[in-house]
DNA sequence: GGATAATCTTGACACGTTTCAGCCCGACGA
DNA sequence: TCGTCGGGCTGAAACGTGTCAAGATTATCC
């Protein structure tokens, strides 16, 4: 069946015997039109199966009912949980989310931002690939609301929702140091991700506090924060002479940690007896891993909810909106993967 | 800084000293405009930072450059992998994906379909919550392309991309029967999901083939296909008298299986020695589970890619498009969770 | 009953594009 | 020299909606 001609507000108007203005009013300000008229219009809408054209509305209004969400990796449960939070908040407001996956690639991120700008989205919630947010500032200057997600804003005039990554790094490292570890590996990357650097610096800070040399922590950079990269990093760690080899590994996220765990297990290295392991994010699968994973928990869903709410607030009342940099606190969850006390040395 | 007035094609035109029609041509059919003019226009575009308004284009053209993807659960890695496939195919074509999460809730699904219709998306890729696809047929009659995802289309005039779920069920069950199991539990739900029913019926069929009574398979329905529901199902299974208790569990997806595994482990039931376990989907985390999970693998990413491609094909050449029902074959991956031969009886 | 107020409704314009009939003008052939 | 051709470009008409000043109708009050 060939699609018939689309039914527009005009058809509804003539069917109901009113003007188009009235139909529009029924749609947008139902209270100002008389009940009898309203019912007649609603009946016509039903009868004709009229569905308003959001493109036209958007054209007239200036901005639409969609918002963009740009994350680093859809396949990472951390981000899907964040997305769920965003969806909760926006769904209630009747907004659509355009979900974009930058895959940690600046070029892909840039392409998606172009696309979102063409769509005239209300706003963009984004975990940027790198710090060059000049592009984002330009976006904002053009009227697109921008909220940084899982990243602290350096500018006071840009909202952001983040978790204190340095603190998270500190918590993890303190835990390992207290368990007696003195040769520790940090697995994370790419280094351009601020989250990775912050977690590393937090770890270094915990070392300082404990009066330990910085060499205690050895850095293994990965090309991406994925399971495969984790496996690879683990085999690099195991490639070292036994005497110099790390006795504990702190990973910048749980996917890496799961990868490390897989490779260690494959090579018959026991966790936590031979090597202890701490991840980051506390995704649901961390608890179900071969060896239940200690991890730094983040309020994933709330992160998304809060970011979306901040955006909606600004959209609804731009005058009184105060830009905010919300920061949540992470929390260490200790499980089996790091439960093994070791005599220092 | 307050956003300045948006720059439109008209501003570009006057800046470059040409008419709006020419600017539009530069944008859409660059070849028909003289090189010198074209360069002048491009320069103006750059200078003014012009970004075309897709809403206006869409209004004029009838349909836009977006498509909707409606899945049952964003948090399920199966669907994020499918989404990745979709993204691959559409990103190349410069299209945007509106990602919707029905959460298995018909009402939510319906709301999202409304929204997508208002957006005048080119098409919808959907894993429907139930079989009542009357709603989807209506959508198609209005000119929205529809492709069923991970679900076989019953109508010859609707494209679909699916995996043979009955076969998947058969593979899993044959494997368990061959290992000697004679009391097996099927965990899955909600029953309204066709995937769940098909996998169950496949399992029953394998039983028939082996000449075993249908009572061999005991059904445990879950309210949702999630980890939490899996834990709950496991405790129901363990609630049975030991002599009648299943010696193997086949789960309709891996999240359920992981939940079952967690609860069994918590209650000190060994997998696979006491109870064998087989999941479905073979998500990446299945291999990394406490006990590596046997699972029925599906070509997740290809599923999404193919569906998107089918849609794009129809969009580009509606005349010659032949509707297709693509069906992939699943594959059983045996890991530790089901590696334990049992003497029947 | 008439003036005024209150409540609804109308109709035209604007939003930023694409499209298309038609105009201009230089080149070419006769 | 004139006519024709065709590549380049123009300008206006749509697309479907929201908005708003102004008009129409009804209610209110003396």
Image (spheres, coloured by chain):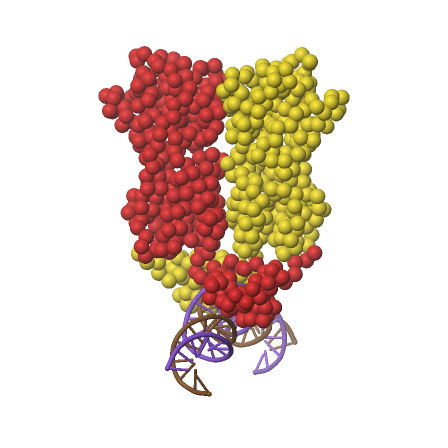
Chain colours: A red, B yellow, C brown, D purple
Q: Look at 53% across and 20% down and name the residue there.
A: B264
Using residue B43 as the reference point, say whether residue B310 is left or right of it: right
From the image, which quarter does the N terminus of chain A lie in?
Answer: bottom right
Using residue D16 as the reference point, say whether residue B132 is left or right of it: right
Using residue A179 as the reference point, say whether residue A262 is left or right of it: right
Please state the horizontal and vertical placement of residue B285, each as a whole percent of the image.
52, 28
Q: Look at 67% across and 24% down and name the residue there.
A: B217
From the image, which quarter does the C terminus of chain A lie in?
Answer: top left
| Residue B295 in view | no
Please state the horizontal and vertical placement of residue A283, each as a whole percent of the image.
44, 31
Using residue A226 as the reference point, say whether residue B218 is left or right of it: right
Give the camera-side residue of C1 and B201. Answer: C1
Q: Look at 68% across and 43% down and name the residue there.
A: B153
- Tell me which corner region of the image, top left, top right, bottom left or bottom right, holds residue B177: top right
Q: Look at 44% across and 41% down and name the residue there.
A: A85
Please state the horizontal and vertical placement of residue B89, each as a whole percent of the image.
56, 43
Q: Is residue B320 above or below residue A254?
A: below
Please state the horizontal and vertical placement of residue B275, each as a whole percent of the image.
59, 18
Give the total number of marks visible in the rendering.
Answer: 0
Q: Is residue D7 above or below residue B136?
A: below
| Residue B76 in view | yes
């Amino acid at each position: 069946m060939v699609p018939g001609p689309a039914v527009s507000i005009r058809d509804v108007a003539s069917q109901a015997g009113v003007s188009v203005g009235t139909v529009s009013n029924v749609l947008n300000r139902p209270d100002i039109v008389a009940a009898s008229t309203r019912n007649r219009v609603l009946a016509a809408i039903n009868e004709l199966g009229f569905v308003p054209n959001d493109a036209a509305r958007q054209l007239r209004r200036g901005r639409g009912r969609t918002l963009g969400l740009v994350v680093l990796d859809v396949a990472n449960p951390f981000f899907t949980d964040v997305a769920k939070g965003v969806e909760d908040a926006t769904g209630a407001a009747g907004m659509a989310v355009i979900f974009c996956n930058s895959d940690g690639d600046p070029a892909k991120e840039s392409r998606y931002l172009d696309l979102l700008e063409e769509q005239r989205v209300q706003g963009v919630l984004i975990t940027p690939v790198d710090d060059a947010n000049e592009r984002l500032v330009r976006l904002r200057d053009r009227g697109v609301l921008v909220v940084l997600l899982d990243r602290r804003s350096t500018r006071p005039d840009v909202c952001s929702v983040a978790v204190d990554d340095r603190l998270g790094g500190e918590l993890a490292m303190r835990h390992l140091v207290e368990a007696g570890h003195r040769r520790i590996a940090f697995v994370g990357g790419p280094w351009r991700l601020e989250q990775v650097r912050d977690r590393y610096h937090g770890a270094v800070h915990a070392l300082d506090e404990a009066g330990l040399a910085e060499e205690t922590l050895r850095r293994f950079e990965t090309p991406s924060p994925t399971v495969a990269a984790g496996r690879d990093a683990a085999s690099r760690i195991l490639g070292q002479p036994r005497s110099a080899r790390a006795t504990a590994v702190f990973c910048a996220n749980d996917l890496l940690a799961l990868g490390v765990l897989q490779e260690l297990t494959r090579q018959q290295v026991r966790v936590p007896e031979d090597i202890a392991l701490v991840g980051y994010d506390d995704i649901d699968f961390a608890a179900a891993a071969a060896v239940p994973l200690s991890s730094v928990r983040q309020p994933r869903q709330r992160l998304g909810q809060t970011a979306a709410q901040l955006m909606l607030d600004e959209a609804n009342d731009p005058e009184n909106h105060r830009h905010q940099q919300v920061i949540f606190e992470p929390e260490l969850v200790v499980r089996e993967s790091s439960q093994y006390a070791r005599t220092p040395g």
